[in-house]
Every structure is written in structure tokens, then in C-alpha cells.
Amino acid sequence: MAYIEKTAFEPRITNNEFNELCNITGRYQASEADADCSAGLLVVRGEQLPCAGFKGIKNENAFYMTAAGAAANADTGVYACNTYEWPMLNGRNGNNYAVGTATLGLGVPAGRDGTFTEIVFDGKHAYRFGEGNLSTAIGANTIFTIANGLLVPAAAAPTTTGAIYFKLKGTGNFTEGAGQSFVYYDVWACKVSTVTA
């Protein structure tokens, strides 16, 4: 899977309480093969990763991740690819060098472990996604559901008890370096708690 342009992710509520942000290590896969993971891609946790260097032992806090679909809910746990990546240059002698430029919206390369942040669907936690994290243009919609790891603009919130969705909080442009970059969408993570007749 190729990277999606103009993707990004930032939790908008800071970690001012112990374990306010639940970050775990994951390796993204598509069709059971390692794949590139774009920033902010919404995923669900799968099997534990093997513990490097130890045959038959699983890592306690590292998992295979796959794109979240419409069946995802607050009970299954939904995570966003929260990259802290940087561009790498490969030297002719096999050395890799980190370059501190263009750090907004970089994804995690295939086969490499990355950080994934659990989304808390309580109507109080806000998150920022890039315009590339939307499956289609937003139009006049203010609600987002999930399909194939992306936000899907919708006219109305789901009505099924336990269903998860995002509600638009605001929009603007990311600041990258000294200038404006691509569009972002701030959203509240919500869950349908009860359905009234």
C-alpha cells in the first residue's frame, strides 16, 4: 500500500493525566503482509508481534495492526497511526541518516514498528487529522464514520447503540516550519450510548 498524501494525526488533549494517551507499538499489515502505514490511519489491533530474538515468544505490548472498517466499535479498540517519523537518507555504506525536515504527515515504512494511539470515544477527546485522512471531500457534512482506515463524511451520526463516529470540531491549516501546509480537521470522538425511540 502506498502512502496517502496529506495525512497527519495529533491528539488535541494533552497527556496531563497518567495514561491519558494509550500508546502501543504496532506493525501495520494489509492482506497479511507488511505495508506502509500513513499517518492517522485508523486501525484495529490483531495478534501479538513475535518477540525479536526469541522463538515462540510473543511481545506483551506490540501487535499487528490492520485498517479499521465499519464493524469497528469502542469495544474492539480503534487506534490511529501516531508517527514520530523523520526522513531517512541511505548512505552508500549501508548507514541510515535521519534528516530533520518535512516531518509533518510522514508514515511508518512497511515492516517497521510504529506508535499507535488508542482513540477514546467519549465525546470529550479531540483529535486532529489531515485532509488525506478523509475518504472523500467533506462537503457540508459534520459527522465521520470509519471505512478502510479513513474518515468517511456523513450527513448524520449512526443510531445503533455502541456505534462510534467523529463529530467535526473545527478546521484550519497545519503549520509546517514557518508556513501553512495542508488542511486539518479537528474532531470529537463519540459513541452512541443509548437509542431513544
Image: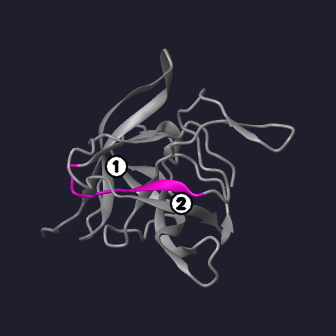
Q: Which residue type does callout 2 highlight?
A: Asn
Residue that appears at 56% across and 36% down: 6
**Residue shown at 57% from the left, 73% from the top:** 51
Above or below residue 150? Residue 132 is above
SS for callout 2: loop
* 71 vs 122, nearest the viewer: 122
Question: Quick check: is 123 in the magenta stretch?
Answer: yes
Give the magenta-colored segment's residue range.
113-124
- 125 or 197: which is nearer to us? 125
Label 2 CA crowd tier, 10 Å (few <14, some 14–19, many 20+): some
Query: Position of 29 compared to 24: left or right?
Result: right
User: At x 54% / y 54%, what residue is drawn?
Assistant: 114
The residue carrying mark 2 is 148
Q: Say if the magenta span includes residue 141.
A: no
Q: Position of residue 175 (x, y in %)?
A: 45, 23
Image position of 72 with respect to 103: above or below? below
Residue 182: image x %, image y %?
A: 51, 28
Q: Which residue is mark 1?
A: 155
